[in-house]
Image (cartoon, rainbow, N blue to C red):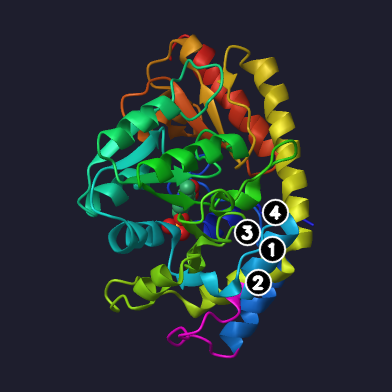
Amino acid sequence: MIRDLTDDQARSAFPLKWGAVEPGVVPGWVAEMDYRPAPPIEDALVAAVRQGALGYPPFGDGGLGDAFAGFAKRHWDWSVPADAVLPTGGVMGGVRLALEALCPPGPVVVPLPCYPPFRDAVAITGRELVPVTVDPDADEAVLDLEAVEAAFAAGARTFLLCNPHNPLGRAWSREELAALAGLARRYDVRVVSDEIHGPLVLPGATFTPYLTVDEHAVVVTSASKSFNVPGVHGAQLVLLDPADRAVFAALPVPAQNSWSPLGIVAGVAAWRDGDEWHAALIERLAAQRALLGELLAARLPRARMRPLEATYLAWLDLRAYGVADPVAAGLAHGVRLAPGSDYQPGLAGHVRLNLATNAERLERMIHRLATALTSRDS
Ligand SMILES: Cc1ncc(COP(=O)(O)O)c(C=O)c1O
């Protein structure tokens, strides 16, 4: 059901992930999966292109709200009104718009490590970023609610949440999120929750849509990550408050990073018709997660992997190997990973590894990384 791409196919499908590495290097960095998209999405996009559906997007949502509401109900038992779902061009563009148009000016709390564009989004909206760092030595990667409260008490007005979390791989618990929501209410802080990884919760964990604990929040999400179609630029905001929807709908054209009709087509096909493929994907990712655990135990037993509850991005602490730059060492041995310091400036010895490929490439990645970290020239 999951159709793997050969190296050549992957290189033409993913010019960033595969094109930015030399032939022979296994790319395990940027968050794309080495799989063909779900057949319903492929079919819907081909049909749309054949129909010439390449004009400006419609002012309605093209069925996106109903399709997302159906997925949310089936997978998370969450009832979302279809008209709360508003299309936008991309998740990060949507986060930026949410900050600018729907959040008060003032400092923004961001847990670190974070997806690097979070920091850029805060910066380009002219806001101060207040980091709340998850201690790399903590037993569990949990939200430091005391530090969050201190930041709110000191004047922060917005909290930028990644739910589930990239790169920590956490699916925050309902209790943690409810505690955050309580603080947000108390200090009149608005939470913007990026839920692009919501459908990528793996067996054993549960995704809690943030709006189910805090109706005042803004959610930005997309099928693009979980269905591997970021290039069609389709995302959506979920806004439960009609007043927020009116503000968003009234944004002038240059402010709203207009979406693609193909993004709508792909989003509708994914949310409405993608369940079978999605189930196969989760099965594959769970198998890759298990394989990664075995490979690390065998080849890199001193590596510490945070439990991967969600996403296909493993967060590895390699400090025990004493290699100053594990990404450079890995690259010299034919594997490209993402440096931990991209996610938390100054953080040493961590990498993010993308396991959404086939078993053989994952084995090669860990084999090469182990050679890089344990050979004398590193
Ligand atoms: C947390 C998070 N948000 C947003 C994005 C990117 O979304 P978009 O390409 O729609 O801006 C990613 C991509 O990996 C991500 O991990």
Q: State which quadrant residue 173 falls in.
A: top right
Q: Is residue 270 left or right of residue 108?
A: right
Q: Nearer the viewer, mark 4 or mark 1?
A: 4
Identity of the residue drawn at 38% across and 32% down: 148
- Residue that sits furthest to the left in the current view: 126
Image coordinates for residue 75, horizontal then vertical, percent = 72, 56
Distance, label 2 to label 1, CA atoms, is 6 Å
**Residue located beneath label 1 in the image:** 71
Q: What amino acid is at disc 4?
A: Trp
Q: What amino acid is at disc 1?
A: Phe
Residues at badges 2 and 3 in contact (C-beta under 8 Å)? no
Tell whether position 60 is magenta: yes
Q: Is residue 378 above or below residue 274?
A: above
**Residue located beneath label 2 in the image:** 67
Distance, label 4 to label 1, CA atoms, is 8 Å
Distance, label 2 to label 4, CA atoms, is 14 Å
Distance, label 3 to label 1, CA atoms, is 13 Å
Residues at badges 2 and 1 in contact (C-beta under 8 Å)? yes
Q: What amino acid is at disc 2?
A: Ala
Q: Is residue 319 above or below residue 92?
A: above
Pointer 3 or 4: first along the chain? 4
Distance, label 2 to label 3, CA atoms, is 14 Å
Pointer 2 or 3: first along the chain? 2
Q: Which mark is residue 227?
A: 3
Q: For this rendering, which residue is in front, 284 or 26?
A: 284
Image coordinates for residue 140, horizontal then vertical, percent = 56, 22
Pointer 4 or 1: first along the chain? 1
Q: Is residue 129 above or below residue 6?
A: above
Task: For mark 2, give the secondary structure.
Answer: helix
Provide the residue span drawn in magenta.
51-65
